[in-house]
Image: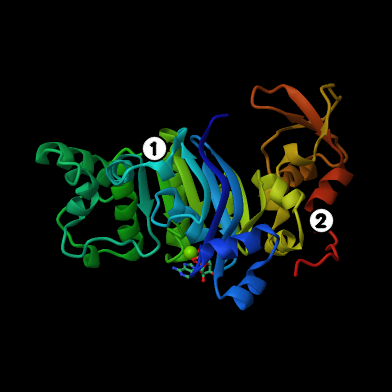
Amino acid sequence: MTNLIEIKNLYKIFGNNENEALKLVKKGMGKDELLEKTNTVLGLNNINLKIPKGKIQVVMGLSGSGKSTLIRHLNRLIEPTFGKIMIDKKNVLSLTQKELLSFRQKNMSMVFQKFALFPHKTIIENIGYGLVIQSMSKDLWIEKASKWLKRVGLEGYEDYYPNQLSGGMQQRVGLARALATDAEILLMDEAFSALDPLIRADMQNILLDLQNELHKTIVFITHDLDEALKIGDRIAILRDGLIVQDSDPQEIILKPADKYVSDFIKDINRARVIKAKSIMTKSTSKIKDAVSINHNMVLEDVLQEITKNPGAIISVTNDSKKIIGKISIEELLNGIKRPVSKTNNYT
Ligand SMILES: Nc1ncnc2c1ncn2[C@@H]1O[C@H](COP(=O)(O)OP(=O)(O)OP(=O)(O)O)[C@@H](O)[C@H]1O
Ligand SMILES: [Mg+2]
């Protein structure tokens, strides 16, 4: 898999004397002590992250853990104290002001939590904004903007103004505006967090549908674990500016790196999230009278299948129906059961 974005040894310290502070951080000083001793804030602490092309990378963490700081480095809304950011093998930090401008217009789009629409522009003008500033002809930008307006289900609202639309509709405008420029990378900072749960679920589905077609590289920030699990191909968890885990969502649930991560996931419904492939024993042998299930089936559904055939062994197949594993009842129950919490502390 190709990585489109590579972040290497990235540090961000807010405040005066950041280079002095950086030396202390590199020697191991943490966020609290740094603030106390130098009156600077450790925003990011040695971030290394590879973001695969065409996938959705979720970034999670408590408030203040550095999520927005991280995403804003990608389009250089924030300059790092130290480190490297490579996008498509180009060092973003070495772009000239002019190159940076064109890079922001053409390669990346951002969707904000508070929508950030222009109140005095109509919906179609909002969606087409990124094209107008590229000096595209009016006919062409209207054509492109109309396509995205329809795609997010807002046909008929072309000439309305943002305040005439509901929150969910406004965020669809935000999404259409971000997609209209054909940028390969989408940066979404808590883009759905201000929406009601039902509308939020709608937006998640719209995004996933679009992603199936478009295969953008998306960096998606959220506080919400359910959202992260639904959307993320990978999930990185930030704490005090450090990445404590970056892995496949299944691995976050099954092998949380520390207590901070296990605290994050402790209340989820494991049966609805963990997939058969994550708990199966690998095996290619055919078992007589086995119940056959797809490797991506979640355990809740596996349980349903097995209650139809009590006592049967579960045989796991891949998408081409080849047998790749088996699951015993004991393994199934163990997968669903909440693990005994570890005693190691993270403070
Ligand atoms: N411009 C700034 N000046 C000083 N400190 C800052 C600045 N921006 C962010 N910080 C600090 O950096 C840390 C990370 O902030 P950031 O906004 O990235 O957190 P976040 O994870 O996005 O939080 P939230 O979930 O609340 O949005 C915080 O301690 C914050 O106080
Ligand atoms: Mg934030």
**Quadrant showing the C terminus:** bottom right
* Image side of residue 343 versus residue 115, left or right: right
Q: Left or right? Give the position of 287 relative to 108.
A: right
Q: How far across and down, in percent of the image, does residue 129 sit? A: 21, 50
Q: In percent of the image, x 60 and y 44: which residue is there?
A: 234
Query: Residue at position x 37%, y 54% from top?
Result: 111
Q: Amino acid at mark 2?
A: Lys
Indicate yes or no: mark 1 CB to ligand 2 under 8 Å: no
Disc 1 packing (10 Å; few <14; some 14–19; many ≥20): some
In this rendered view, identify the residue nearer to me: 338 or 141. 141
Apparent side of residue 128 relative to residue 3 in the rendered image (left or right) = left
Quarter of the image for residue 64 reads: bottom right
Identity of the amino acid at label 1? Glu
Residue 122, compared with residue 141, is above or below; it is below
Front-most of residues 310 and 107: 107
Q: How many marks?
A: 2
Labels 2 and 1: the sequence-earlier one: 1
* Residue 61 visible in the displayed image: no
Mark 1 — residue? 184
Q: Quadrant of residue 184?
A: top left
Residue drawn at point x = 16 percent, y = 64 percent: 120
Mark 2: secondary structure: loop
**Quarter of the image with the N terminus in it:** top right
Q: Percent from the top left, x then y, of residue 126?
A: 22, 54
Q: Position of residue 127 (x, y in %)?
A: 24, 50
Of residue 108 and residue 205, the one placed in the foreground of this image is 108
Helix, strand, or loop for circle 1? loop
Residue at image coords 34%, 50%: 175
Disc 2 packing (10 Å; few <14; some 14–19; many ≥20):
few
> In the figure, is residue 175 to the left or right of 258?
left
In this figure, which residue is indicated by the disc labeled 2? Answer: 337
